[in-house]
Image (cartoon, grey):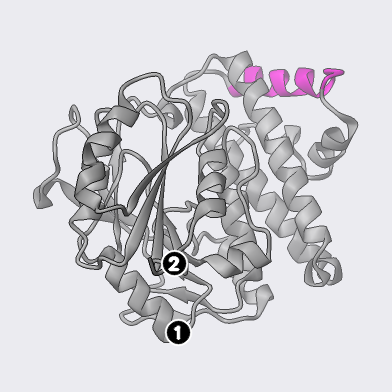
Amino acid sequence: MNEPKISVIVPLYNAERFIRQCLISVLASKFQDYEVLVVDDCSTDNSVAEVEKLLPHFDGRLKILQTETNSSGAGVPRNVGIRHAAGKYVTFIDNDDFILPTALGDLFDAAEKFQADVVHTVKAFLFNDTGGKMFSRADLQLQSDSSDDHFETPRLETDDLRERMKDYVVEKYFWLPWGKFYRRDFLLANEIYFPQVKFSEDMVFCFKCLCLAKNYLRVPFATNIHRISKDSGSKKILSSREGVRMWLGVVTVVLQLINEFTGRLDFFRDNPDIRHAALKFFVDKHFDMIKNLFQGVPAYDVQKIFYDELQNPAFDSHGKNLVAAYLYAERALTR
């Protein structure tokens, strides 16, 4: 059997209500030279059984993989998918999302024409979930990148990393891994994988891709339909101390990873101002997330919890140094 052109990777965890819709959208693709790797993260519901029902319809192109233990995130399953992928290109779909019938073909054609390492679409169509019903065109709303930069034809981004970073910190590039298309050899050669953190692993992955891709292509169309659900983990409001402690740990790990990564690249060592701007961007974005999570909690109370946690002996000294260096606690929800 010839290697497929595209490997579609779907991390799966307790999505029995949605995974069938997700996979049927791939099955309906007009481009048929693909494989689908569903990587189950030890689901406790009937998700895997729902996938197994569809195996006969994919004619051997659908494979089910399994993580050894539950990882509590999408990063580890995606890494398993990358390592097992056989396609020239890799793309990701969340287990409760969909793709358009033209998505795979449009992405493949654009990547081939421009010899792209990464193809970056406008963000996505949004589907407002009302109990897991199937979507219609009337349900969809296009959410594009937050910048005012509009374009009508595919274009390669500049290979000047200074310019890319200027655009990154004003959110020209969204940092979610879906809605993008990656040349598999590019990921493997640069050892680009998702870090094992509960949140924000996608930000690290996409940042590395932006920094290391020689041919980074932006296209003026969306391919993914992203479900917005009130039950989403990212939408849940956490208790103040529990949540602050969790996010403090996550952001510290993310900062360490970005700090170590940028420290290995000559460009960032030669341009400490841009390195600092990139790190500050990660801090700012996480505090925006925290602000949304702790609605109704007085900013002073949240800030005090941050200061208290910075003194926690379990919080390693390297993390403390990074937090202090990039104004971590001082920024806490004071805007």
Q: Where is residue 68 shown, x and y percent of the image? A: 57, 29
In magenta segment, residue 60:
no
Quarter placement of the C terminus: top right
In this figure, what is the number of numbered marks?
2
Q: Secondary structure at mark 2?
A: strand
Query: From the viewer's perspective, is 33 left or right of 131?
Result: right
Q: Is residue 156 left or right of residue 211?
A: left
Q: CA distance from mark 1 to mark 2?
A: 12 Å
Give the percent coordinates (x, y) of residue 290: 56, 31
The quadrant of the picture occupied by the N terminus is bottom left
Which residue in the structure is indicated by mark 2? Answer: 120
Is residue 303 found inside the magenta-colored segment of the image? yes
Secondary structure of residue under mark 1: helix
The residue carrying mark 1 is 114
Q: In the image, what residue occupies the spot 72% across and 52% down?
A: 279
Crowding around mark 1 (Cα neighbors within 10 Å: few <14, some 14 to 19, many 20+) is some
Q: Residue at x 46, y 21 (%)?
A: 237
Identified by mark 1, the residue type is: Phe
**Nearer to me, 290 or 216:** 216
In the image shown, does 225 or 160 lie closer to the viewer? 225
Q: Quadrant of residue 218?
A: bottom left
Residue 102 lies left or right of residue 282; in this view the side is left
Q: Is residue 87 above or below residue 49?
A: below
User: Residue shown at 63%/29% (left/top)?
Assistant: 247
Residue extending farthest to the front is 1
Q: Main secondary structure of the magenta part?
A: helix
Image position, residue 132 (x, y; %): 19, 31
